[in-house]
Amino acid sequence: MAASRSHGEWQMETTSNMKNPEEKPVLVFATQNPNKAKEVQQMLGDAYVIKTLIDIGCHEAIPETSETLEGNAEIKAMHVVKKYRLDCFADDTGLEVEHLDGKPGVRTARYAGEDANADQNMDKLLAELGDTEHRAAQFRTSICLVRGGVVERVEGICKGCIADQRGGAEGFGYDPVFIPEGETRTFAEMDSEEKNHISHRGIAVRRMVETLLASK
């Protein structure tokens, strides 16, 4: 016969199994960049606790093997969900140039080769466009959000065109050659607040935040 437990033991077990009503749900951002996570945390307030891959001990590389932005975002989010049993969202971004049939697209970060840097990628892009006047392009960010096993997707698009040459020293990636609609400046000629207000990623993140807060 099993030994009976004291009232104190029962009370301790009940307390340990009870969810703290003040405890906020954890949502992992599949990034190693703490600044990106901090930005989302500020937008969500205290509705969620945002953690990065580093915060949860995820140090392995997550292969992005899909041929679409949506697919890569889902691969990263589902890796966290399946291995770490935590809700997660992940993003992937591509530059899509009309004259190049949507390229670089999913290969935006590796356009000039697997180990290419931003300057090499921009060099290849500008060389392929040459002196054409057809320079319409858009940045597109796809976010995959997985909560309770349910997959949701949002995206943000910033339309614009590719400049003839680099301009500005801010930002990263293709920012020095991308001019958003309604502007004469490149992303790299704007400060971060200006850029985030109109950028593809800023739009996508704000839409995701609206989705999250609406369901609270």
Image (spheres, grey):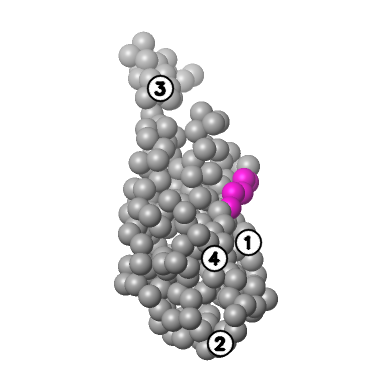
Precedes in sequence: disc 2 or disc 4 = 2
Q: Residue furthest top?
A: 7
Precedes in sequence: disc 1 or disc 4 = 1
Precedes in sequence: disc 2 or disc 1 = 1
- Magenta-highlighted residues: 151-155
Local crowd size for mark 3, using a 10 Å CA cut-off: few (<14), some (14–19), many (≥20): few
Look at the magenta stretch and give its main secondary structure: strand
Q: Are marks 3 and 4 in contact (CB under 8 Å)?
A: no
Q: Are marks 1 and 4 in contact (CB under 8 Å)?
A: no
The Cα atoms of the two marked residues, 1 and 3, are separated by: 36 Å
- Residue 149, percent from left and from top: 61, 42
**Is residue 8 covered in magenta?**
no
The Cα atoms of the two marked residues, 2 and 4, are separated by: 17 Å
Quarter of the image holding residue 196?
bottom left
Q: Nearer the viewer, mark 2 or mark 1?
A: 2
Instruction: Name the secondary structure under disc 2.
Output: loop
Closer-to-camera residue (15/85) = 85
Q: Residue at x 62, y 59 (%)?
A: 70
Instruction: Name the secondary structure under disc 4.
Output: strand
Name the residue that disc number 1 marks.
71
Instruction: Name the secondary structure under disc 1.
Output: helix
Q: Residue at x 41, y 67 (%)?
A: 185
Residue 160's disc number: 4
Precedes in sequence: disc 3 or disc 4 = 3
Name the residue that disc number 3 marks.
21
Precedes in sequence: disc 3 or disc 2 = 3
Name the residue that disc number 2 marks.
131
Local crowd size for mark 4, using a 10 Å CA cut-off: few (<14), some (14–19), many (≥20): some
The amino acid pointed to by label 4 is Gly
The amino acid pointed to by label 3 is Pro
Q: Nearer the viewer, mark 1 or mark 4?
A: 4
- Residue 72, percent from left and from top: 58, 63
